[in-house]
Image (cartoon, helix red, strand yellow):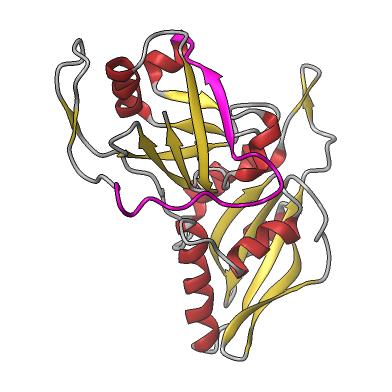
Amino acid sequence: MKRIVDIGFQKVGCWKLKEEQVDLELNSQENTNNVLYAFVCEGKVMYVGKTTQPLKKRMYGYLKPGKAQSTNIKNRNNILASLKAGHGVDIFALPDSGLLNYGGFHVNVAAGLEDSLISNLSPSWNGMQSKITGLTGDPKGKTSNFIGQTANENIAEPISNDVDQKFQFQLRKTYYNQGFFNVPVAYMEAFGEDHDRIEIFCGKHLALIDGHINRSANNTNSPRIMGGSQLAYWFKNSKNLDDKIEVTVLSPNSILVE
């Protein structure tokens, strides 16, 4: 814990038990955006994350995780287990002051430090959430075989709120060849956090690709959906360059691509 305090982290709250369930107490920075945060248990850093959302909103994701939010569910369970074992779990935060610039460009401290802290501190609750399932088939044909999961019956219902949960993007050459696409800024809050796993259901057969969310690639922090070689394979076998692709947001960590 001393190492994160030395670089400016401060305790802003804690997790506690209330009627045998996880409860949140935030004493400061609750409305601050662009925050690097850490969960500390018995003086040891257990998890490091960052958020572009207000800190209180991000912590609420752990308090009330959605069914597809694997990172939130995992951390909530870790927090609950620690609290029930009698170990306190404190929340530390390092907000981005906005004062760090390089060549006239703002440097996001949270985005810049997260990977280094995880690499050096090896927090036990951190772990890469994404994995890619296998594909076989002729990439020059228009048929493909996804090895692994399909979800014709188990696909989630779209989440409901005040905005339309469908948007389109044009299948540009980079998307087509590399297997990713950017989410429009208007829809950025509908998606999970940086590094979160995301389920990508593809086409009428609902073939499933496990990808991840990248919120560091765009300076707006709008998500880039990374499907890698398998999404590129699906694009090449199902679509043509410059086609309009429709995306339906099923949950913050689950989408349908058609």
Identify the image quadrant of the C terminus.
top left
How many numbered discs? 0
Q: In the rendered image of this protein, does residue 86 appear above or below residue 30? A: below
Q: Which of 82 and 174 is in front in this view?
A: 174
In the rendered structure, does residue 157 fall within the stretch colored magenta? yes
Q: In the rendered image of this protein, does residue 186 appear above or below residue 125? A: above
The residue at 46%/56% (across/down) is: 68
Q: In the rendered image of this protein, does residue 199 appear above or below residue 41? A: above
Q: In this view, does 127 lie to the left or right of 3?
A: left
Residue 191 placement: quadrant: top right
Q: In this view, does 240 lie to the left or right of 125?
A: left
Residue 72 in the image, given as x and y percentages of width and height: 52, 61
The residue at 50%/66% (across/down) is: 75
Identify the image quadrant of the N terminus.
bottom right
Residue 239 in the image, given as x and y percentages of width and height: 36, 15
Q: In the rendered image, is residue 179 in sight?
A: yes
In the rendered structure, does residue 253 fall within the stretch colored magenta? no
Residue 216 placement: quadrant: top right
**Farthest residue, direction left:** 137
Q: In this view, does 26 lie to the left or right of 189?
A: right
Residue 228 in the image, given as x and y percentages of width and height: 36, 28
Residue 182 in the image, given as x and y percentages of width and height: 56, 26
Q: Which of 196 and 165 is in front in this view?
A: 165
The residue at 55%/20% (across/down) is: 169
The residue at 71%/47% (across/down) is: 162
Q: Nearer the viewer, residue 88 or 245?
A: 245
Q: Main secondary structure of the magenta part?
A: loop
- The magenta segment is 152-173
Q: Nearer the viewer, residue 48 or 6?
A: 48
Q: In the rendered image, is residue 9 in sight?
A: no
